[in-house]
């Protein structure tokens, strides 16, 4: 993904207003901007494979940005995940807005030597639902589900 893509916050605002717009790629720089560089204050969830951040746009609208861990999935699995998310479109399922794949070469220390390594970041972003996680609302006392 080109870090200097021309997609702007205004484009993202329009995407959020029009449910017919297809999910699309956004540049990492835009996602960094709206999540305050993935700051702890914007963290809204954490799991074994990802951290979710609240991205806030200039107009006050928000999206949920899921930053996958570097070791979570290979490129083929990520493509399959995006393909499945694009196909899901239902009023009872959180809306998938798009994705980001960014690869950047970095000099890193490895076994006492500096090496050049490609660091790949994969992110998914969804509509933001403000009332917390679903587990707070799902209960079934008859089966002991809490």
Image: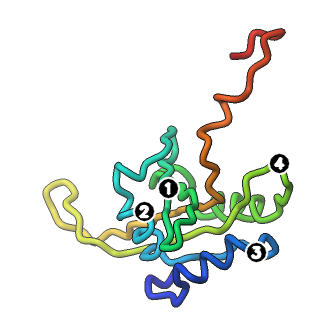
Mark closest to the chain's N terminus, 1 or 3: 3
Label number found at residue 18: 3
Q: Upstream in the sequence, badge 3 or badge 4?
A: 3
Mark 4 — residue?
92
Few, some or many residues within 10 Å of mark 2 (<14, 14–19, 20+): many
Q: Are marks 3 and 4 in contact (CB under 8 Å)?
A: no
Q: Evaluate if marks 2 and 1 touch, with contact meaning CB atoms under 8 Å apart.
A: yes
Closest to the observer: 38 or 48? Answer: 38
Neighbor class of circle 1 (other Cα within 10 Å; few <14, some 14-19, many 20+) is many
Q: Nearer the viewer, mark 3 or mark 2?
A: 3
Task: Look at mark 2 in the image and give the residue it sits on.
Answer: 35
Q: Secondary structure at mark 4?
A: loop
Between marks 2 and 1, how big is the CA–CA gap? 6 Å
C-alpha gap between disc 4 and disc 1? 21 Å
- Image quadrant where residue 22 sits: bottom right
Distance between mark 3 and mark 2 Cα atoms: 22 Å
Q: CA distance from mark 2 to mark 4?
A: 26 Å
Residue underneath mark 1: 54
Task: Looking at the image, tell me whether mark 3 or mark 2 is earlier in sequence order.
Answer: 3
**Residue 54 horizontal/vertical position (percent):** 49, 55
């Amino acid at each position: 993904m080109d870090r200097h893509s021309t997609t702007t916050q205004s484009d993202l605002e329009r995407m959020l207003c029009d449910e017919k717009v297809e999910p699309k790629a956004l540049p990492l720089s835009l996602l960094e901007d709206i999540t305050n560089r993935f700051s702890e204050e914007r963290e809204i969830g954490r799991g074994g494979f990802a951290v979710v951040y609240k991205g806030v746009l200039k107009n006050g609208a928000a999206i949920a940005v899921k930053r996958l861990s570097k070791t979570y999935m290979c490129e083929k699995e990520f493509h399959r995940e995006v393909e499945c998310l694009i196909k899901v479109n239902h009023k009872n399922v959180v809306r998938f807005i798009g994705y980001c794949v960014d690869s950047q070469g970095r000099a890193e220390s490895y076994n006492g030597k500096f090496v050049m390594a490609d660091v790949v970041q994969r992110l998914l972003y969804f509509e933001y639902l403000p009332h917390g996680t679903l587990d707070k609302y799902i209960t079934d006392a008859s089966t002991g589900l809490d």
